[in-house]
Amino acid sequence: MLEIIFAVLVLLFVFRVIRIAVRATWGLFKVLLFIVFFPGLLISLAFAGMIILALPLILIGGTIALLTPA
């Protein structure tokens, strides 16, 4: 009986740790995405001569950044 209780508690602990790890990883991914990858994509599009694509993306991103609370 104690083994079953122990196993259930260990599983609960493992699932909570996995949930915390996924949340932390998702937060880190969002930071990298919006600070590194998105501006890098826009700069590379502009240097490649595709300003026609980069300009609408930066306008949409800037508008969303201005309208959403921090």
Image: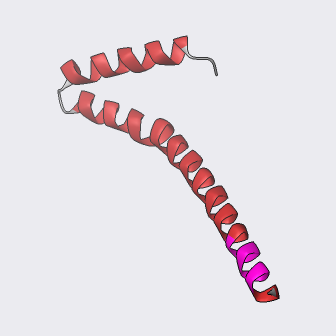
User: Could you tell whether 15 is left or right of 62 in the image?
Assistant: right
Q: Nearer the viewer, residue 11 or 21?
A: 11
For the N terminus, give its image quadrant. Answer: bottom right
Where does the image place residue 7, in percent across and percent down from the top left? 71, 81
Where does the image place residue 18, in percent across and percent down from the top left? 62, 64
Q: Nearer the viewer, residue 22 or 61?
A: 22
> Which residue is depicted at the point 53% across and 12% down?
66
Residue 48 is covered by the magenta coloring: no
For the C terminus, give its image quadrant. Answer: top right
Q: Which coloring applies here?
A: secondary structure
Residue segment shown in magenta: 4-11
Q: Nearer the viewer, residue 6 or 30?
A: 6
Where does the image place residue 27, in percent across and percent down from the top left? 58, 46
- The single residue placed furthest to the right in the displayed view is 2
Q: Quadrant of residue 9?
A: bottom right
> Which residue is depicted at the point 57% across and 56% down?
22
> Which residue is depicted at the point 37% across and 14% down?
59
Vertical side of 57 occupied by 39: above or below? below
User: Could you tell whether 24 is left or right of 39 in the image?
Assistant: right
> Which residue is depicted at the point 39% across and 35% down?
38
- The single residue placed furthest to the front in the displayed view is 1
How many numbered dots are placed on residues in this image? 0
Where does the image place residue 61, in percent across and percent down from the top left? 42, 21
User: Could you tell whether 36 is left or right of 6 in the image?
Assistant: left
> In terms of secondary structure, what is the magenta stretch mainly?
helix
User: Could you tell whether 3 is left or right of 35 in the image?
Assistant: right
